[in-house]
Amino acid sequence: MSSRTASCCCGQLRIEVQGGPHTVGICRCLACQRRTGSVFAALAGCAVPYRVYGTATEHVRTGDRGARSGFRFCPVCGMTVFHGEEGVEGGVGVAAGAFADPGLPAPRVSVYGCRRHPRVDLPPGMQAFEADPVRRRTLLAFAAAVVTASVRAQGRSDQRFPDVIDVKVRASAPNTFDFDVTVSSPYDTPSRYADGFRVSTPAGEVLGERKLLHDHQDEQPFTRDLHSVRIAPSVKAVLVQARDQKHGYGGRSVQVRLPGR
């Protein structure tokens, strides 16, 4: 596998990754605008392993949903080269411009559109979010989820199960909750697709289930809701898992704490 190197302006700090970025995204939050001096930050999501050369200084920032990200920059020229996030394993976020490669893949996802400069438009086909699409995470975590989907999409027939990549839950009545569930199933076709998801207790008791009646091959990842799930007061957290039409339940699941408990 070929390697690719990103470096700071003076060349003192470098990071070498294997292969190319699996996904590229942009963040328009005000913190990234200040950090880069631009109207958005461009991030290349790269998989492990990687190797760092030179000396890096770290600045840790806590995002507005609690995620803590460590940005590594060169102490000589001051340029940020890469960053990681607490609790996110298996990848690293590299400043896209640090590769100095105009042939880098085009961005696929944009977050914090609510901070967008009106004069800057998105390219056609980019998936855009008004804020952070993944609870308590930054663009790096969302990119990690997209990386997983992207890698699996290279061999779609080999993926047996869909992945749950985001869950939002809100109380709609006493002991009753509504869920918005985001699922990645890049292998979807009309003949085989992700056909449902369920909410259960960590012990496995099923509390609610949503059936999906068609594929979502042109909408990846996709988000669907499940309303009015009754949950006993003793349950503090639930597990959300998606189902494949052929293989049943499996893949990445998400555990989420119920609000107010």
Image: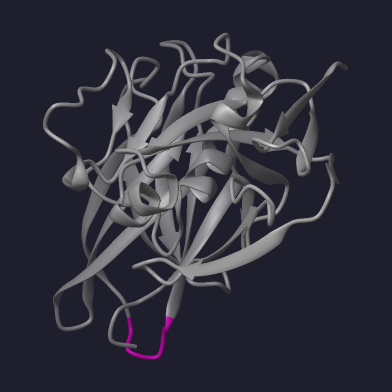
The main secondary structure of the magenta stretch is loop
Residue 145, picture quadrant: top right
Quadrant where the C terminus sits is bottom left
- The one nearer the camera, 52 or 207, is 52
Q: Tell me: 198 left or right of 84.
A: left
Q: Tell me: 170 left or right of 54.
A: left
Give me the residue at 43% from left, 45% from top. Answer: 36
Quadrant where the N terminus sits is top right
Say if residue 205 shows up in the picture. Answer: no
Residue 27, picture quadrant: top left
Q: Tell me: 125 left or right of 90.
A: left
Residue 134, placed above or below residue 59:
above
- The one nearer the camera, 78 or 125, is 78
Where residue 211 sits in the image (x, y, percent)? 33, 39
Where residue 91 sits in the image (x, y, percent)? 69, 44
Q: Tell me: 19 left or right of 232.
A: right
Where residue 205 sits in the image (x, y, percent)? 49, 69
Where residue 158 sits in the image (x, y, percent)? 70, 20
Residue 176: say if magenta: no
Give me the residue at 20% from left, 22% from top. Answer: 121
Say if residue 2 shows up in the picture. Answer: yes
- Color style of the picture: one colour
- Magenta span covers which residues? 232-236
- The one nearer the camera, 91 or 174, is 91
Count of numbered circles in the view? 0
Residue 71, placed above or below residue 17:
below
Give me the residue at 52% from left, 39% from top. Answer: 143
